[in-house]
Image (tube, rainbow, N blue to C red):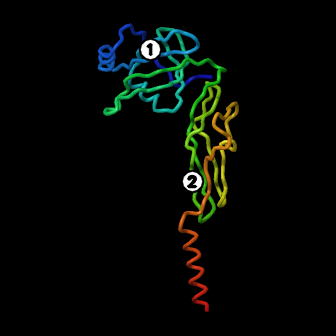
Amino acid sequence: MSVENKLEATTRDNFGKGAARKLRAAGKTPVVVYGHGTDPKHITVETHPLSLIVRQANALIELDIEGKSELVLVKDVQKDPVRQIIEHVDMLIVKKGEKVEVEVPIHVTGTSFSGTTSLQDLNTARLLVPATSIPDSVVVDIEGAEEGTQILAGDLELPKGAELLDDADHLVVQVVVPRGAGADEEAAEAAEEAAAE
């Protein structure tokens, strides 16, 4: 499998706030790569391409660290709370064929039965998936679902090779009649009956 996200990185020897500020001023971001029993690698990457990649959830990246290729998954991004500039990134080394734990968004599609609405309780699903095939999302279709329909985490259609880590009984989405809608219908029926008498 080819990885779409590729970055070139260089090893860094200077640490601390001052060194990190100088890197950021030069358009680079400090990164720590760890995992698989290896010592953490302190590297730098160009900030602009990195910022485009970390916008994607569960971004898989092929890092070229001075000629040596590493497959990594973004684990943590630290940003300046005011300016929203990336200050530091942690990346986890993964191997092809290995499974990783990720959170993917749940998207509800379709329209429930007329007069009902859907309430989404769970917005993300924790999955154990192959590192090289992380899904962008899990889709729940509620097209034509009637009042009282409940879809639980265990009912989700997961991609091939994915395992659910959330409680299977956790409510994802339910279809309900909005409050007041039933009372309005009853009042209209009562008015019609009164007019008929």
Residue 11 x/y as whole percent: 43, 9
Q: Secondary structure at mark 2?
A: strand
Q: Nearer the viewer, mark 1 or mark 2?
A: 2
Per the rendering, the mark at residue 9 is: 1
x 49%, y 14%: residue: 64
x then y, percent, for residue 134 = 60, 30
Q: Which residue is mark 2?
A: 119
Locate residue 105, reporting x and y percent.
56, 39
The amino acid type found where label 1 is placed reads Ala
> Which class describes the residues within 10 Å of circle 2: few (<14), some (14-19), or many (20+)?
some
Residue type (three-letter) at the residue carrying disc 2 = Leu
User: Residue 112's quadrant in the figure?
Assistant: bottom right
The number of numbered discs placed on residues in the rendered structure image is 2
Mark with earlier residue (1, 2): 1
Rendered position, 82 above or below 24: below
Label 1 secondary element? strand
Q: Is residue 5 left or right of residue 150?
A: left
Front residue of 76/166: it is: 166
Q: Left or right: 180 with respect to 44?
A: right
Q: State the residue at coordinates (53%, 23%).
A: 73
Point out which mark residue 110 bears: none
- Quadrant assignment, res 83: top left
